[in-house]
Every structure is written in C-alpha cells, then in structure tokens.
Image (cartoon, coloured by chain):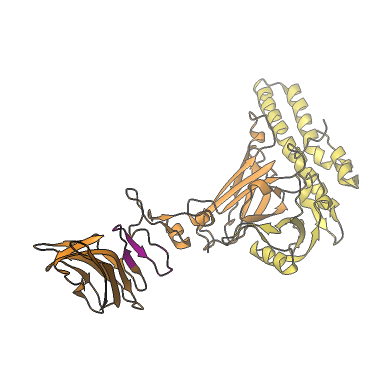
Amino acid sequence: MPMPDYLPAVYGEPTIPDSLVFIAITMQDPAAPVAIMGFNTIRRDTGEGPFYIHAATPENIEAEIRKANFAVTGWRIIRYEDIPKDRTYRDSLVDDGKKLHHDMARAKEIHKTHLRVERAPLLAALDVEYQRADERADAKEKKRIADEKQKLRDVTNHPGIGAAQTTADLKLVWPL
Amino acid sequence: MILTSGATQKLQLVTSAAATIDVEVAGVDFTAPSTFVPYTQQTAITTAATTDILAVRGASVYGNTEFISIANKHASQATDVELLKVGTSITVRLGKVVTLAAGEWMIVNEQGTVFVFGVDGGVRMGQIAASDTAPGLIELAVQSEMEAASSVLVAVTPGRMKYHPGVAKTILHTTGTATPVADANCTYGCTITDTNVGRLTVNFSTAYSAAGSYCVQVNVEVISVTLTAAANMMQGFMRFGGQASASSCEVNNCDRTATTNVIRDPISWHVCTWGDQA
C-alpha cells in the first residue's frame, strides 16, 4: 500500500496576511531542525489602544527569539512559499542560509520511524495470531507467522531507503 | 425660592471644617402692598461654625431668596455644608448635607434645585456611587481593580477587560500545512514558532508575572474522521518544563496509539492561557 498522508490538508492553505513575517531560525543544537517563527507585525494585545505596528526589525525579531528562550546561531526572514508543504520529514528540515531543504540522513531515519509507527500494530496483530497458533500447537502456522514478522522487521532495512536521493524517493519506499 | 419673613426667620450655613467658604445669597424683599426691594448678602466663612448667611428681613417683610451660591475656595480642605432655615419656632435643614471638596461649589437656584459642581466645572450629578440598588456615579476600573476582581462599584471598559483573571491572556488557533500559521481571526496576545513535528512554542506578547504561574489549556484537531482507532486520537499537552519561561511556553501533541505514542502534528492547535501578567 502507498505511504499514508502524514498530515492531510483538511482546510486547504491559509491566506497569509502581509503583516505576518516568517523567520527561519537555526538552533545551536546541531541535531535540531530549523524552527519557523510567525512574526506578527500588526498586534492588538498590549496597552489600551487599538492595533499597533511591531515592525520586523532585527532588534524586535531577536527580542522575540530571546523571549522563546531559543539558543540560536542565526536567523533570516523567509516567505511562506519557501517552506516545504509536506511535513512528512519536517524534523529533517535545515536552512543553508539560502534555501530550506531536507537533510537526507535525518530524513531517512525519520522514514524508518514512520515505518516503525505503521508497522507496530501489524506486529501486534501477528503476535496475537502467533499466540493462538501456539495454543493449537500449529507449527506450520507459527512458522508462517514468524516469517511475516521478520519481513516486517526487515522493512526498515529496505535498500530503497539508503538509495533515496530526495524525500520524494523516500515516500515511494513503503514496503508495508 | 426660599421664603423668610418677619423679624426671626433667617438662613444659616453649617460648615464642618476650616475651609474657605464664600456665600452669596440674592433675592427680593416684598412689603405689602407693592414694595419690592432686591437684596444680596455676601458672607465669608473660614471656620467650622454655624453662620448666618441671610439676616432676618424685618417685621412685615417677606424675603424671597432666589439664588444661593456656596463656594469652597480652599486649596485642599473639604468641608460638609448644611443649609438651615431658622424659623419662628423651629430650625429646619434644607436639603442634604453636601461635602464640598476643595475647589467645588454648590448653588441653589430659584426652583430650589441644588447643583454641585466639581473642580473641572462640570456638574457633579450626585455623591452616591451607583450600586445594585441605587443609580449614581460610576467610576471606571483600572488595571489593579480588574486584577483584584473584587469591586462591584466600578465599571469595566473594553480596553481593561483583558486584565481580569478570568479572561484568557492569549488565544491561539492555527491553520496551515507547511507550518502552523496563527489564524488572524482568533489569535490574541501571542506569536508562535514551529520547532519540530508536534511541538509548538507560544510567545506571549506580555509576559506573565513568573514562570510556571499561569494556566495553559491545549487542544488539537485530530487527523482522521475515524475515532474508533486509538491511533486516530491525539492529545495536546504541555511538555515537562514547558512553563520554564514567563514569556513563552511549549506545547506538544502525540497520537494515542498504545504501541507507539509518538509526537506528531495535529491538523490545528488550540491554545489558551490565563494568569497574572507582569
């Protein structure tokens, strides 16, 4: 079966107001993916007046980053369109200073995690079948089930995962 | 009008403190059959005392007082003032005892209506604060009164409602697929950062008084219409240490599959926070 949609688009894409600026933030932790901050430049939440302008100046952006207690190495302003729409491999997203892209080594590990998540209930069901076969002393059925379980364990070693060059390639590797 | 007649009736003013009170009384004397003579009397009072402000009119003379002005010229001293009519055999109080703050004044017009004017020159409609049972003046609540949430005598204005402890200080709903986007129609008091799958940092526009001293409620929209499978149920929660900052918090979401229970993205986040802001 094909890889299921990780996050279906139920309501479609939002309308992004001009007042909303997106910031790509690179964390000090090398294992952390890039963070995406939505910075509102028109606010209505402090003081007692109406809406006010909170410009996306470097000072204001860095103050917002400090408020979030992020330890960062850098940030830059990006567009919503620059953010990959598919979040299947979101935690592998990194910023090279010009473009957001997926770190394939991390993406492959994430793909294996997705396989493990979808595999878990299948293995659990086979465990039940194996137990029943064992109760019947059905050695042939137990062997069949054991082979099925081993196939499921092997899905994370599929050669297509290591050979994948892009996240699109990875999504095609779905031996479940 | 206030009538005084004969050789005994007069008007007095009782003052309760050593303010600086100027009194003007004006009217017309009538002596039958047709003699009308206007009169005025000015009196300066600087002590707590009972002072004559209109002398007796004389035998067979009817005094028709049409105007009384009582002004507190003192820079800081307030005083109670009480208008009395000394009659032939009884002294009566005319109206209520009025407190005149420094700079305020009171008039009684020819209809007998009493007006009290504040230091800004406007009519002070009454000294009674509006309550559940009486109409009157209403004061506007300030931030500290809203935060205390105890007064039943001050009114709430839209700009100060947000300080009440029962009002959410941040409201967040997200849309978007590439990254959570704060829905402009129902987001208040915060910005967001998508840090990882299933993890969201919420920055408060105004920080709370202290870390860990505010309430966070998280809900999420799940990813499937099928609710019979545990995997399709999700749970939004605040991670351990998620309130370590007074200016932001981190919320998470996981699926409820017993075998995996992984952190993952919801369709949308719904977050509200309450507490005392700095």
Residue at x 40% of width, y 70% of height: B119
What quarter of the picture does the N terminus of chain B occupy?
bottom left
> In the rendered structure, which segment of residues is drawn in magenta?
B106-123
Location of residue B96 in the rendering, given as x and y in whole percent from the top left corner:
25, 60
Q: Main secondary structure of the magenta part?
A: loop
Q: Nearer the viewer, residue A169 or A100?
A: A100
Q: Chain A drawn in what color?
A: yellow
* Residue B25 versus residue B141 in the image, above or below: below
Q: Magenta segment: does it hold B96?
A: no
> With A165 as the anchor, is B109 left or right in this view?
left
Q: Nearer the viewer, residue A91 or B59?
A: B59
Q: Give the letter of the orange chain.
A: B
Location of residue A114 in the rendering, given as x and y in whole percent from the top left corner:
76, 41
Report which quarter residue B47 is drawn in. Answer: bottom left
Is residue B202 visible to the viewer in this orientation of the structure? no
Q: Nearer the viewer, residue A85 or A101?
A: A85
> With B252 as the anchor, is A30 left or right in this view?
right
Is residue B201 visible to the viewer in this orientation of the structure? yes
Residue at x 64% of width, y 22% of height: A135
